[in-house]
Image (spheres, grey):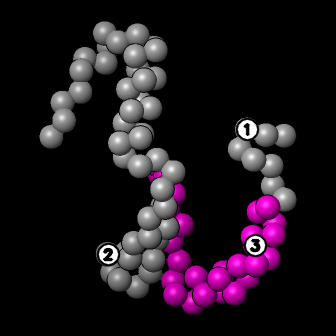
């Protein structure tokens, strides 16, 4: 178990550095797919998103049926931070 330093005594720069290091250590930006506890649905987590995308098998299959169309729309979106 990791013990954090006294955050109240850290500068803003030190806090930002700590957050970046923790994000890298936790695999920020990675995608993980897990079954829900009841085993009836699958959840997709992206990076440190607090809320996963969760759907039943039939719902995932319906989304996957439109994968090409979805990819085409996504490719027209601006990059993060872009205009």
* Outermost left residue: 1
Asked whether residue 21 appears in the rendered view, the answer is: yes
Residue 32 to residue 78: above or below = below
Residue 79 to residue 54: above or below = above
Whichever of labels 3 and 1 marks the residue nearer the N terminus, that label is 3
Look at the numbered discs 2 and 3 and tell me whether their residues touch, using CB distance below 8 Å.
Answer: no
> Residue placed at 31% from the left, 9% from the top?
9
Asked whether residue 51 appears in the rendered view, the answer is: no
Measured Cα–Cα span from mark 2 to mark 3: 28 Å
Measured Cα–Cα span from mark 2 to mark 1: 36 Å
Q: Viewed as shown, does residue 25 lie left or right of 75?
A: left
Q: Secondary structure at mark 1?
A: loop
Q: Quadrant of the C terminus?
A: top right
Which callout, 2 or 1, points to the residue nearer the camera?
1
Location of residue 12 in the rendering, given as x and y in whole percent from the top left corner: 45, 14
* Res 75 quadrant in image: bottom right
Q: Which residue is mark 2?
A: 37
* Res 24 quadrant in image: top left
> Residue placed at 39% from the left, 72% from the top?
34
Whichever of labels 2 and 1 marks the residue nearer the N terminus, that label is 2
Q: Which residues are magenta?
A: 46-75
Please give the count of numbered marks on the rendered protein. 3
């Amino acid at each position: 178990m990791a013990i954090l330093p006294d955050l109240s005594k850290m500068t803003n720069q030190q806090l930002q550095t700590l957050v970046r290091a923790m994000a890298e250590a936790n695999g920020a930006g990675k995608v993980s797919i897990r079954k829900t506890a009841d085993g009836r649905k699958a959840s997709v987590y992206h990076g440190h998103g607090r809320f996963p995308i969760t759907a039943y098998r039939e719902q995932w299959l319906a989304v996957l049926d439109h994968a090409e169309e979805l990819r085409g729309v996504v490719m027209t979106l601006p990059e993060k931070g872009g205009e």
